[in-house]
Image (tube, rainbow, N blue to C red):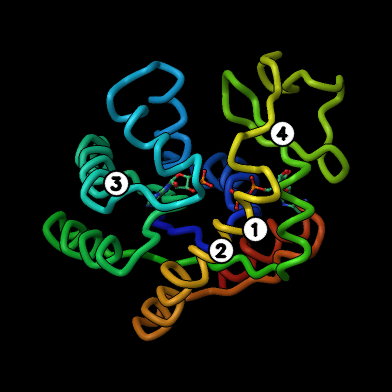
Amino acid sequence: MRLLLMGPPGAGKGTQAESLVGKYSIPHISTGDIFRTNLREGTPLGLRAKEYMDKGQLVPDNLVVSIVVDRLESLEGDSGFLLDGFPRTLPQAEALDRRLQDLGWGLDAVVNIEVPHQTIIERLTGRRVCRQCSSTYHLKYNPSQVRGICDTCGGGLYQREDDSLETVQERLEVYNRQTQPLIEYYRERGLLLSVDGSQEIPAVLNAIIVSLEK
Ligand code: ADP
Ligand code: AMP
């Protein structure tokens, strides 16, 4: 299964990815997680990306594309993948198409998780993430069993710097301007599956699986 997960920041891409990669036994490639891991490790890539992430802007296409291409080329055999948070611009989508064509791999589907604007704000400002394994929680909608501690690995939970109200507004504007046009791009290619992401987490997962298996 070769999948893209799309949707505005806070739509639930990372949350659904955690279940989908288990169900379909595919690797999860999240560009946001890759940047945050690099930042934690203090690599030049992480420090470069931070300049953009802290402002809610997109990291330049050339940096992102080369990371994803490297990841795709390092996959063993044709085992499939789930890309989360990539592509986010038209040049990224075109670069991905070219690379997949070279590899002889077609996409199976692009899942677009739709959620209203107000829901996004509430989800992002209440989001907590594990420092160690990147599992995602929400203070109200998906709390960890012990406050501040990850259920999966026992790591500490933190609030992302870019989940402040001010940066969230900028990220939503960036999404509307640069990423939303890709929905049409994939619809035209007959790949788009849209699901209602305002339902509870298990219901969204079920809607994705049903639409994938139709
Ligand atoms: P994205 O990866 O699209 O930015 P996340 O998966 O990190 O979004 O989800 C954003 C926040 O919303 C997290 O705190 C997550 O726990 C919460 N969340 C995700 N899906 C739902 C849902 N269907 N209902 C309520 N909260 C959700
Ligand atoms: P995310 O974890 O998907 O919310 O991404 C967090 C931040 O990482 C974004 O706001 C961007 O600054 C950066 N980022 C992640 N993926 C991309 C991408 N495909 N293109 C450009 N920037 C990205």
As shown in the figure, which amino acid type bears the numbered disc 3?
Answer: Val
Element assignment for label 4 = strand
Disc number for residue 128? 4
- Answer yes or no: is residue 116 visible: yes
For badge 4, the amino acid type reads Arg
Q: Spatial distance from mark 2 to mark 1, Cα to Cα?
A: 6 Å
Name the amino acid type tagged 2. Gly
- The x, y position of residue 78, in whole percent, is 27, 46
- Which residue is located at x 30 percent, y 65 percent? 93
Give the Cα separation between the discs numbered 3 and 1: 21 Å
Disc 2 crowd, CA 10 A, few/some/many (<14, 14-19, 20+): many
Q: Quarter of the image holding residue 114?
A: bottom right
Q: Which residue is mark 1?
A: 11
- Who's the residue at 58% across and 52% down the image? 13
Query: Is label 4's Cβ within 8 Å of ligand 1?
Result: yes
4 or 2: tag closer to the N-terminus: 2
